[in-house]
Image: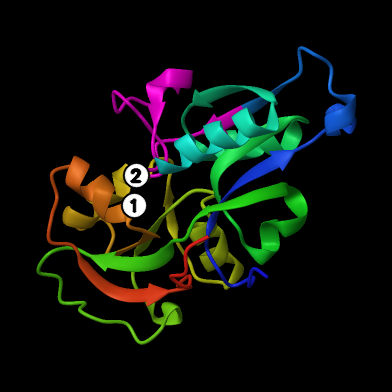
Amino acid sequence: MLKLKTCGLFLGLLLGAASARAELPADYKVVLLTENFPPFNMAVDDKNFARDDGIDGISADIVREMFKRAGIGYTLSLRFPWDRLYKLTLDRPDYGLFSTTYTPERVPLFKWVGPLAKTGWVVLAAPGSKITALKDIKEAGHYKLGAYKNDAVSQSLESQGIPVLNALRDQENVQKLVNGQIDLWATTDPVGRYLAKQEGVTGLQTVLRFNEANSTSH
């Protein structure tokens, strides 16, 4: 049984009344939406828009195989920003969203398929920062803390009353961190370091790991 504290990645689906497998029309397709969230899902050319074969990543491969085995048609689009994709999926039947972090608050919002992968959450500081460790996530609220709008990390922090400075692209937090616009960056591991490397930034310091998922495979 999945523990609710885990932050594994799933496919979240909002299914309409006609979506029971036995009742699907021949031309039925699920609209699958994703974003650049490397190494789990990403555009082959690193741009913010891609379709079908232009989308790569661990989760993308698993989702493709999942729908192939189920014999259900789908379209696959990578777009930006995540906030828009998240709201669009909540508003439209027969839409799916991945990779989506499974949290207690989100449980009633989607039909969940997975898990696709396990992840953990981290707070990162810039290279050479005087902030070297936090005792808990509440302490992060004493600093300018960057996060990603409507991402599960940001939603969790805000639900605990921890103030965050949300960016529409998580990549923006890399430059904000090294430029001193934020003191800390709350993100998903290993995604944060992957994004930082793409931005040419290395040496980020992990000052806290929290909401860690267990490391067992699925």
Q: Earlier in the sequence, mark 1 or mark 2?
A: 2
Residue 188 horizontal/vertical position (percent) = 39, 58
Above or below: residue 178 compared with residue 38: below
Tell me the quarter of the image containing the N terminus.
Answer: bottom right
Q: Which residue is mark 1?
A: 191
Residue 120 horizontal/vertical position (percent) = 42, 66
- Residue 50 painted magenta: yes
Any part of residue 51 in sight: no
- Residue 142 painted magenta: no
Please name the colour scheme applied to the rendered image. rainbow
Work out which residue is located at the far front of the displayed protein and give it.
69
Quarter-of-image position of residue 207: bottom left
Looking at the picture, tell me which residue is in the foreground, 217 or 148: 217
Residue 201 horizontal/vertical position (percent) = 14, 50
- The residue range painted magenta reads 32-57
SS for dot 1:
helix
Left or right: 62 as drawn, with respect to 23: left
- Kind of residue at badge 2: Pro
Q: Which residue is mark 2?
A: 39
Q: Residue at x 84, y 17 (%)?
A: 25
Residues under labels 1 and 2: Cα distance?
Answer: 7 Å
Above or below: residue 188 compared with residue 111: below
Looking at the picture, tell me which residue is in the foreground, 177 or 74: 74
Mark 1 and mark 2 residues within 8 Å of each other at the beta carbon? yes
